[in-house]
Image (cartoon, helix red, strand yellow):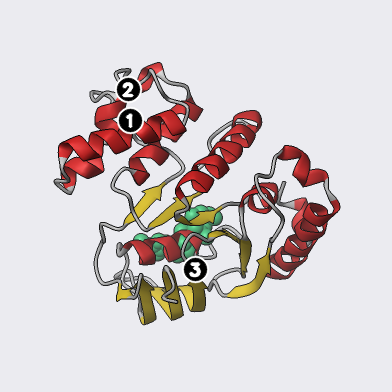
Amino acid sequence: MVASLEFKDVNLTYQVDGRAPVNAVCGVSLSIGDGEFVAVVGPSGCGKSSLLKLALGLEMKTGGTIHIGGDEVEKPRRDVGVVFQSPVLLPWRTILQNVLLPADVLKLPKAEASRNAMDLLALAGLKGFEEAYPHELSGGMQQRAGIVRALVHDPRVLLMDEPFAALDALTRETMSIELQRIWMARRKTIVFVTHNISEAVLLADRIVVMSARPGRIISDLQNPEPRPRDIRFLSQPAASELSGKIRESLDRAYGIPARELVA
Ligand SMILES: Nc1ncnc2c1ncn2[C@@H]1O[C@H](COP(=O)(O)OP(=O)(O)OP(=O)(O)O)[C@@H](O)[C@H]1O
Ligand SMILES: [Mg+2]
């Protein structure tokens, strides 16, 4: 089977004029199957966002190959959706107009895109807010709109870079459960970068741990526990055991006990 997203021996060295080169990603090989939910954790500055930017075609690798659905990534692609820490909605556009932005840019058929947007907004619990403006929504609702916007053009792969980091702890938990629900309904391939071990354990099928810069993969852990998982899942022995393994890997990655650094 063709992998949905595949990194093979990928390197990225940033070369900024007048400065020493920064080796951000080193020898990363990772094959992600269709519909798989993969979390990426690792120390700050280890190259997680860089890895996503490479898959998005926003940065050019300095070595190796990256394929999405069997095609080599050489420039930004339309079959990838992305969600950042802050949703950056345009204040003068309604929620519906905001989430339709990628469909407008890609000139997708309007009626079909609107139908998909309405379905996704309902799935994300935003029914009734289609005509509202971003400032009328809470932070969590805005981030949900950001997720809908990333999915509106029906991408093959959804890349999420600490999407819930700016939210309070309770909203963050609710959003994790909502994301799981959306993922179970749509089954997109998701790469989810987070600093939060519980979030990774709750959401992912597989957790990849990266070392400090230059980022290498130092563990690749499976999480086969059944879904849907709720917050209570985190106090079960399987979840605690997995959290422990991630912490051990992070201890190695940081070189100091990760429990002092990661919630
Ligand atoms: N555009 C760029 N030009 C030069 N160096 C960069 C650029 N983007 C990132 N870097 C460097 O590459 C390294 C990895 O950065 P990256 O943003 O990928 O880390 P990260 O793992 O996402 O960190 P965090 O957890 O803090 O978000 C850092 O040392 C950073 O300074
Ligand atoms: Mg980052």
- At label 1, the amino acid type is Met
Residue 130: image tag: 2
Question: Which of the two labelled residues, at mark 1 and mark 2, occupies the earlier sequence position?
Answer: 1
Q: Residues within 10 Å of mark 2 (few under 14, many from 20)?
A: some
* Quarter location, residue 92: top left
Q: Residue at x 28, y 25 (%)?
A: 91
Query: Which x, y percent locates residue 76?
Result: 26, 61
- Above or below, comparing residue 221 to residue 122 in the picture: below
- Above or below, comparing residue 137 to residue 260 in the picture: above
Number of marks drawn: 3
Whether the residues at callouts 3 and 2 have beta carbons within 8 Å, the answer is: no
Residue 196: image tag: none
Whether the residues at callouts 1 and 2 have beta carbons within 8 Å, the answer is: yes
Q: Residues within 10 Å of mark 3 (few under 14, many from 20)?
A: some
- Along the horizontal axis of the image, is 54 left or right of 26? left
Q: Which residue is mark 1?
A: 118
Query: Which x, y percent locates residue 193?
Result: 53, 55
Q: Secondary structure at mark 3?
A: loop
Q: Which residue is mark 3?
A: 33
Q: Residue at x 50, y 47 (%)?
A: 183
Instruction: Tell me the CA gap for discs 3 and 2.
Output: 33 Å
Question: Which of the two labelled residues, at mark 3 and mark 2, occupies the earlier sequence position?
Answer: 3
Along the viewing direction, whichever of 231 and 258 lies nearer the viewer: 231
Instruction: Tell me the CA gap for discs 1 and 3.
Output: 28 Å
Along the viewing direction, whichever of 181 and 134 lies nearer the viewer: 181
* Quarter location, residue 95: top left
Instruction: Tell me the CA gap for discs 1 and 2.
Output: 8 Å
Q: Secondary structure at mark 2?
A: loop
